[in-house]
């Protein structure tokens, strides 16, 4: 597609979201990316949190973590460019070890992935022998390698229920764990260090959690919801399950990023409030111009924000930054991700 044709396509969707001058410049960069993508036989995956001009131009597939890991596993392209954060690109590499996987940012971190180490998981296994470990996909490969089965926000309840185990260790998001505990009717504990625990037996638990948090979703509160409902009584409120359990309980709907997008598409209500990363609101508005997204605040994930069209072009030009995972870790991590994909 020529830069002009791409510009016209983007303008149709993004005229109300991205300023005109910026849009033309972005369309030119996007057009170079698409050309290079074809020359290098590359696949571009774009997470739902990508900024609107990128989200609506270059990805072959957009979606949530679960959908994109499926696409990474299925592709026959030589290169996967992952427009998301590092744990997502690592998951692509875990599932497609023969492909070159590129992340357009040097770091692309995540506060959840950084909240736990493989050593932490080994210590928990020692303390609760025989208890299956479920890890959120927002973890690094070393942690996935110590895990029985991964999950995403889209299938966490299903994965926990599939284990048929009275007790599970669920890592590392404390709020997602509490949301899963509520939905599955399980009682959750957060273990304190053994030195502080004395001899107290920890018998009354069914989910053992970990105190990791998403630095974006932890910011939303029930007061935010109450204030918005007072002003806009008909608003439909959607919250990602990384939000506090009292926030998801006060919202009208909670689900993965794609589940929220589909929910807005399905409803006929006029006003929506999304309690999640703010670029996704712009992406939804672009697809649903008849609907209004209320902006509570502009909480942008600083890590997702590192991914730009400019750096994606460089990623393809210089084949940077390549994701590598040592084979022994990759093979063990793959088992936990593949088990999750088999569950749903
Ligand atoms: P999804 O799997 O719902 O896309 O969420 C990923 C994420 O990092 C949310 O903050
Ligand atoms: Fe991680 Fe939160 Fe950013 Fe998602 S929004 S990538 S969980 S820091």
Image: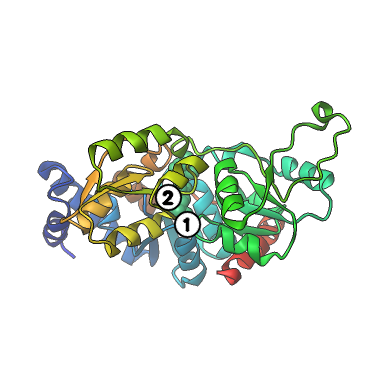
Say how many tags the image has: 2
Cβ of disc 1 within 8 Å of ligand 1? yes
Q: Which residue is mark 2?
A: 84
- Circle 2 residues within 10 Å: few <14, some 14–19, many ≥20: many
Nearer the observer, 286 or 220: 220
Nearer the observer, 134 or 235: 235
Cβ of disc 2 within 8 Å of ligand 2? yes
Which one is in front in this view, the residue at disc 1 or the one at disc 2? 1
Whether residue 21 is visible here, answered yes or no, is yes
Residue at the image position 34 percent from the left and 65 percent from the top: 60
Residue at the image position 60 percent from the left and 69 percent from the top: 343
Residue 136 in percent (x, y) is at 59, 51
Residues at circles 1 and 2 in contact by the CB criterion of under 8 Å: yes
Classify residue 321 as left or right of residue 164: left
Quadrant of residue 202 within the rendered picture: top right
Comes first in the chain, label 1 or label 2: 1
Residue 237 in percent (x, y) is at 34, 48
Quadrant of residue 277 within the rendered picture: top left
Q: In the picture shown, does residue 36 fall above or below 113?
A: below
């Amino acid at each position: 597609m020529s830069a002009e044709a791409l510009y016209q396509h983007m303008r149709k969707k993004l005229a109300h979201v991205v300023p005109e001058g910026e849009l033309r410049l972005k369309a030119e960069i996007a057009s170079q990316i698409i050309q290079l993508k074809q020359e290098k036989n590359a696949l571009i995956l774009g997470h739902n949190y990508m900024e609107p001009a990128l989200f609506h131009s270059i990805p072959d597939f957009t979606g949530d973590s679960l959908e994109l890991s499926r696409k990474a596993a299925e592709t026959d392209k030589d290169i996967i460019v992952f427009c998301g954060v590092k744990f997502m690109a690592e998951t692509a590499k875990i599932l497609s070890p023969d492909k070159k996987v590129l992340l357009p940012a040097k770091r692309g971190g995540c506060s959840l992935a950084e909240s736990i180490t493989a050593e932490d998981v080994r210590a928990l296994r020692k303390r609760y022998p025989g208890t299956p470990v479920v890890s959120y996909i927002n973890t690094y490969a070393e942690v996935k390698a110590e895990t029985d089965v991964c999950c995403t926000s889209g299938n966490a309840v299903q994965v926990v229920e599939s284990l048929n185990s009275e007790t599970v260790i669920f890592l590392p998001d404390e709020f997602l764990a509490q949301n899963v505990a509520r939905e599955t009717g399980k009682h959750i504990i957060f273990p304190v260090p053994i030195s502080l625990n004395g001899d107290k037996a920890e018998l009354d638990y069914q989910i053992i959690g970990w105190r990791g948090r998403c630095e974006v979703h932890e910011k939303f509160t029930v007061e935010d919801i109450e204030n918005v409902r007072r002003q806009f009584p008909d608003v439909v409120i959607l919250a990602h399950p990384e939000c506090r359990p009292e926030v998801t309980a006060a919202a009208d709907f909670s689900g993965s990023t794609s589940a929220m997008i589909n929910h807005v598409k399905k409803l006929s209500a006029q006003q929506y409030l999304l309690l999640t990363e703010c670029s996704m609101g712009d992406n939804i508005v672009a697809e649903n111009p008849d609907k209004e997204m209320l902006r509570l605040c502009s909480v942008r994930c600083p890590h997702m924000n590192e991914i730009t069209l400019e750096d994606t072009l460089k990623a393809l030009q210089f084949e940077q930054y390549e994701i590598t995972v040592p084979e022994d870790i990759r093979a063990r991590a793959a088992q936990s991700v593949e088990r999750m994909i088999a569950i749903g």
